[in-house]
Amino acid sequence: MRGVYANNCVYETVTGWGAFEPVLSRAEEMDVSEIWRMAADIPEEWYEFDSDGLDRLVERLYKRRAIIRDLIAAFRTSCRNPFPNWIASRQVVAA
């Protein structure tokens, strides 16, 4: 549950996967060079000139992008019930 906002009211408007689009699909389809283009704009002071650390971060982000949808789904079905207005559909969720 790290990275989750403490107050569920911020999630009340989420009614389905559409609430995460187009950002979710864009993140899932991102290639490593696109992540690097964004990382190149980060001021070196922000990562304390640790270029090896930035390299590890980019590689980790690239690998984790494939599980974003699974993480949202796990959060959605957690006992916390963060999306009380989620409307179930028969639509198959792409991985």
Image: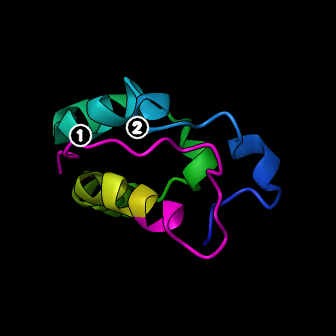
Which image quarter: residue 94? top left
| Residue 61 in view in this figure | no
Task: Tell me which residue sits at (54%, 42%) in the image.
Answer: 44
Task: Tell me which residue sits at (76%, 42%) in the image.
Answer: 10
**In the rendering, at what x and y percent does residue 23 appear?**
40, 28
Which image quarter: residue 5? bottom right
- Between discs 1 and 2, the one toward the N terminus: 2
**In the rendering, at what x and y percent does residue 78 appear?**
55, 72
Q: CA distance from mark 1 to mark 2?
A: 10 Å
Q: Name the residue at the bottom extreme.
A: 79
**Residue identified by numbered label 2:** 17
Q: Which label belongs to residue 91?
A: 1
| Residue 85 in view in this figure | yes
Task: Tell me which residue sits at (51%, 35%) in the image.
Answer: 42
Label pair 1/2, CB-CB below 8 angstroms:
yes
Give, as a single range, the part of the protein colored magenta: 74-95
**In the rendering, at what x and y percent does residue 40 appear?**
39, 33
